[in-house]
Structures are given as C-alpha cells and as structure tokens.
Image: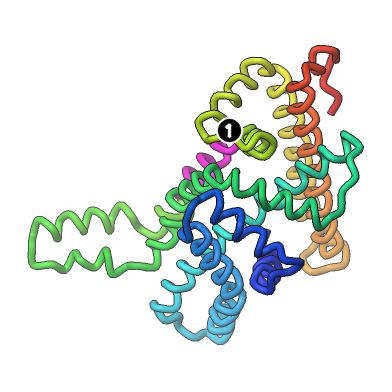
Amino acid sequence: TFPFSVVAALLFFFNWEKHHSVLRHALLRRTGGMVVYGFVLVCAAAALAKPFLFTELFKNVANSVPQPLILLQWASIVDWLSFLFEIMFGIGVQIYLILMVYSWVRGLNFTTRHLMDFAIRRFSYVMKWTALGLLLSSLFINLPLILVNFPVVLQAAQSENLALQKHFHSLADYFGPETFFHFVDYVGRPVMAGFFILFSGMQIILTFHSESLVKAFKDYLHFLRKEAWSVAGWLFIAFFNFYILAVLNGAMKEGFAEDNGPAIAWSLIYPLLNAFIGGWMLASWVCLYKRSETGRVRDEHWVKY
C-alpha cells in the first residue's frame, strides 16, 4: 500500500472525519488497554517518517556518500514498523471493500463515511488475526533484513573466549548478507503467501461474525469441508488471472525499451489492471462465502465468478 499508506497515516493523525476517534474507541473497547492502540500510533509515525528517511539515504547514494551504519540501522527499523502499518492499512481497506460488496449485493443504502466507520469497528475484531500475520511477516521478512544492518552482532567473533569465537564465526559464515536476502525471497515470502492462501477465509468470517479467533477457525474449517471444490475452483481462477497478468507484465517490460512512452504508459496501466482483478476476485469471494452461508451454492451448477 506504499506510498498511499503515508497519506493514510497523515489523515490518521489529523483525525480525518473522526475516523481516528472511532478506531481508538474500538481498539480500547476490544483489546482492553492502550498497548495495541499505542503500537498502531508508533507504526503510523514510522509510516510518516519513512519517505523522509529513505530520501536522505537516496541522496547520499546519489552523491556517493558512505552510509553511516546508525542511519542504515534506524532505516531498517523504521521500514519494519512502516511495513506493519502498511499491512494494517491494507487489511482495513479489504474489510471496507468486503462490506461494500455485501452492501451492493444486498441492495443496502450506505454512505462512504458511515461504511468506513463500520469497517473500522470490524477491524478491531480482526485485530487478533492481523496480529498473527504481523508477527509472521516480522519473523520471516523484516527480522532478517534488519539483522543484515547489525554486523556488530557478528563481530563478537573477536571475543577472547575461543568457544564463543568459534560459535560466532560459524554464524558469520552461515548468516552472510546474501543468505538473509535468499531466506526472505525463497523461504519467508513463500511461507507468508502460503499461510494467507491457506487461511484466506479467516478475515471474512471475523468481519461478518465478530467471533473469537478459535471459533472463527472452527467455522473456517467447517466452511472448507462444505465448499472444498468451490474454494478450489475460486483459487484456480484467481491464480490463472494473476498468472496471465504477470506473464503479460513480463512480456511488456522486455518488449519496451526503458523510459520511453509505451513503457511509462504500461507502468501506469499495470497497477490498474492488477487492482481490477484483485477487486473482482474479492467481490466473487464475498459472494461465494455469503451464498455458502445461505445454502444457495447448492442451487448453482457452477459458482458464477
């Protein structure tokens, strides 16, 4: 969601249309304390600081100025906290779109502001599931990228303790910078993608039913047992569409020269196509889930996506 998350953080601190107040009240009511709300504030502040911090880094790189280690370390931490806010902002947008699709399908009247407030209240119920996703992304993606900028840990190999020296030498050999990036690309991101695909129904269940995490998990397993073929068909169609779009994007990038008119035009068109397919699949997912709840899936020969 970057860089839109920067605008969202700015509006968040300005209490745009009092949405900040709604979120604060909902989090304090559902989580029972200031810890979660304070964590959201810290992540939002990091999202605001991220563009300025990385602009300074890019200026130094452009001027061939060596990067101070402390600046790289703080940049990695700010990037991590900003990334968490970007995830929370993205999940909030998804909840809003889920409720908007449901309102359209049911023919309900709503205003953008009231639906946004309702989505924010629903977000407080999804927060426990969101926290699990934030924890996994921190461990599998952000933590390795942060550790790359803290070589002082590996420099403990200079210790006079021979056993400790040998131990840290092995860590330095094993956890080189390339290994961290390799872990993120080939282990962290696939694990995260598989996790969110496998438990893709948890968010929509919590959005509509405000259940506990354990109850929502049981309901999700029941939903999978009842609609396994329909869910598999939906996943196949989603994969097929995004795969075709990825192939098309790769072909366009190879076919166009860099920084010419068609390349710039395609760079603007591709995110719109990606968003269109994502919105279409999200809408079809809401329809599939709600038809399953009412038993109407059995009345169809095939789920109409």
290 or 172, which is in the foreground? 290
- Compared to 98, does 14 lie above or below? below
Q: Residue at x 71, y 49 (%)?
A: 119
Residue 189 in magenta stretch: yes
Give, as a three-letter code, the residue at label 1. Phe
Q: With 260 as the anchor, is 246 left or right in this view?
A: left
Which of the 4 quarters of the picture holds residue 159?
bottom left
Q: How many marks?
A: 1
230 or 148, which is in the foreground? 230
Q: With 272 as the anchor, is 153 left or right in this view?
A: left
Residue 5 image position (x, y, % from top left): 67, 64
Q: Residue at x 46, y 49 (%)?
A: 135
Residue 191 image position (x, y, % from top left): 50, 39
Q: Magenta part of the protein: which range?
A: 183-196
Q: With 278 as the anchor, is 34 left or right in this view?
A: left
Residue 118 in magenta stretch: no
Which residue, given by chain and number where applicable, does mark 1 sit on?
199
